[in-house]
Image: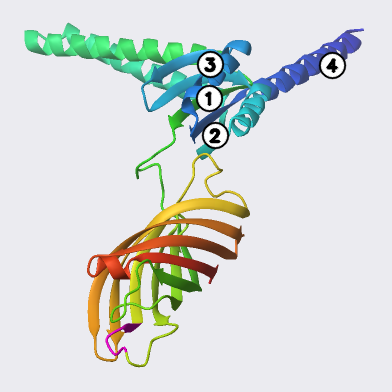
């Protein structure tokens, strides 16, 4: 009978232990997550964000807000966290950083308890030192240190209670920002290595005998070096028709330029494979030569273009620019139509 009772106790203990262990393994962790994201529609997304928090009755630990961004520290379930990430995509938010780390509550609680024990040992030592200290300044120093240690103990005890409330949850730090319009530490330049070539037609607005032809063909080497996209071009324009008796007309134009293109925030910011609209600019140097003439010039040109197709390996785009040279502006300014093909190298 005693043996039977002994086995019954062992079995009961095993069942209770296994249940406690299962509960402990399921509820002894939480996810520490952080998200930085921006949106071109901050004024519309921000109220939707607040509505999501209210509908899900999420616990808000901290909140700060200014014109540029809003920051939250939230506690939610794993299911709510998954739904929240889907909402960010639905609201067309662009994620800059996303991190998720599993934190083990027993380990963190043990670390806090160890810290409390260490602080209590210090307090006991200082109380003992107070009994043998006659210097008033030393006594005040010990008392101040004891007060500081007691405050740290209370802080650790509060943190232990908070850890108990985080079982099986996600603690999320979220920063929702307006779309950056100037370079900042959150915008990382993405360099690429994409050489290619460009074919251009340049048509002066007011061609004039002795200066400019009616139109020029251009052949350029074009090198893209940021995903943004920034590039340089080197090449030449050749006049299609130069009268034999006009020895002063510029028949060749050598070109070196630097340019940047910018995607529209309202049209997907260049995220599509087809038909991405962009605008940009070029600044450059032009060397004009003719049979008996030459000219050195600099220019700027606003541009607008369409990426016909792009993927991870190539980019085919067309654009139109208006070249504005600083010298002989009336007869050398005009429209340039270009098509370029670049490859990842």
Magenta stretch bounds = 246-251
**Earlier residue among tags 3 and 2:** 3
Q: What element carries label 1?
A: helix
Q: How crowded is mark 4: few (under 14 residues within 10 Å), some or many (20 or more)?
A: few
**Earlier residue among tags 2 and 4:** 4
Residue 204 at x, y percent in the picture? 38, 69
Residue at 43%, 75% in the rendered image: 215
Residue 77 at x, y percent in the picture? 64, 20
Q: Is residue 322 above or below residue 36?
A: below
**Earlier residue among tags 3 and 4:** 4
Marks 1 and 4 close (CB-CB < 8 Å): no
How many angstroms separate mark 3 from mark 4 (CA)?
Answer: 51 Å
Q: How crowded is mark 1: few (under 14 residues within 10 Å), some or many (20 or more)?
A: some
Which is nearer the eye, 137 or 11?
Answer: 137
Q: Does the magenta stretch include residue 97?
A: no
Q: Name the residue under label 2.
A: 93
Residue 16 at x, y percent in the picture? 77, 14
Residue 14 at x, y percent in the picture? 79, 18
Q: Is residue 209 above or below residue 142?
A: below
To which quarter of the image does residue 344 belong? bottom right
Q: Name the residue under label 4.
A: 11
- Please identify the dominant SS of the magenta region: loop
Q: In this view, does 187 lie above or below 207?
A: above
How many angstroms separate mark 1 from mark 3 (CA)?
Answer: 9 Å
Which is nearer the eye, 63 or 13?
Answer: 63
Q: Name the residue under label 3.
A: 50
Marks 1 and 2 close (CB-CB < 8 Å): yes
Mark whose residue sits in front, 3 or 4: 3
Q: Mark 1 points at which residue?
A: 45
């Amino acid at each position: 009978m005693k043996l039977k009772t002994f086995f019954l106790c062992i079995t009961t203990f095993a069942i209770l232990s296994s249940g406690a262990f299962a509960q402990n393994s399921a509820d002894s962790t939480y996810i520490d997550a952080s998200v930085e994201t921006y949106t071109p529609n901050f004024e519309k997304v921000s109220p939707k964000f607040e509505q999501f928090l209210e509908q899900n009755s999420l616990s808000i630990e901290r909140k700060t807000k200014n014109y540029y961004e809003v920051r939250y520290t939230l506690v939610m379930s794993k299911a709510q966290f998954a739904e929240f990430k889907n909402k960010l995509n639905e609201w067309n938010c662009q994620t800059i950083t996303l991190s998720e780390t599993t934190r083990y509550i027993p380990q963190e609680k043990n670390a806090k308890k160890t810290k409390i024990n260490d602080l209590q040992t210090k307090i006991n030592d200082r109380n003992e030192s107070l009994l043998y200290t006659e210097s008033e300044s030393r006594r005040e120093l010990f008392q101040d240190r004891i007060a500081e240690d007691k405050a740290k103990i209370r802080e650790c005890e509060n943190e232990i209670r908070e850890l108990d409330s985080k079982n099986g949850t996600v603690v999320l730090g979220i920063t929702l920002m307006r779309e950056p319009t100037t370079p900042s530490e959150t915008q990382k330049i993405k360099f690429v290595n994409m050489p290619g070539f460009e074919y251009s037609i340049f048509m002066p607005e007011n061609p004039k005998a002795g200066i400019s032809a009616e139109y020029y063909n251009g052949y350029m080497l074009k090198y893209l070096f940021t995903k943004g996209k920034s590039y340089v071009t080197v090449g030449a324009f050749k006049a299609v028709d130069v009268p034999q008796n006009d020895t002063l007309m510029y028949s060749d134009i050598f070109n070196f330029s630097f340019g940047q293109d910018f995607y529209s925030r309202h049209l997907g910011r260049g995220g599509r494979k087809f038909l991405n609209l962009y605008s940009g600019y070029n600044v450059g140097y032009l060397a004009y030569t003719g049979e008996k003439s030459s000219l050195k010039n600099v220019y700027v040109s606003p541009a607008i273009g369409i990426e016909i197709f792009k993927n991870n390996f190539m980019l085919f785009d067309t654009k139109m620019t208006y070249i504005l040279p600083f010298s002989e502006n009336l007869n050398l300014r005009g429209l340039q139509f270009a098509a370029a093909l670049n490859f990842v190298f």
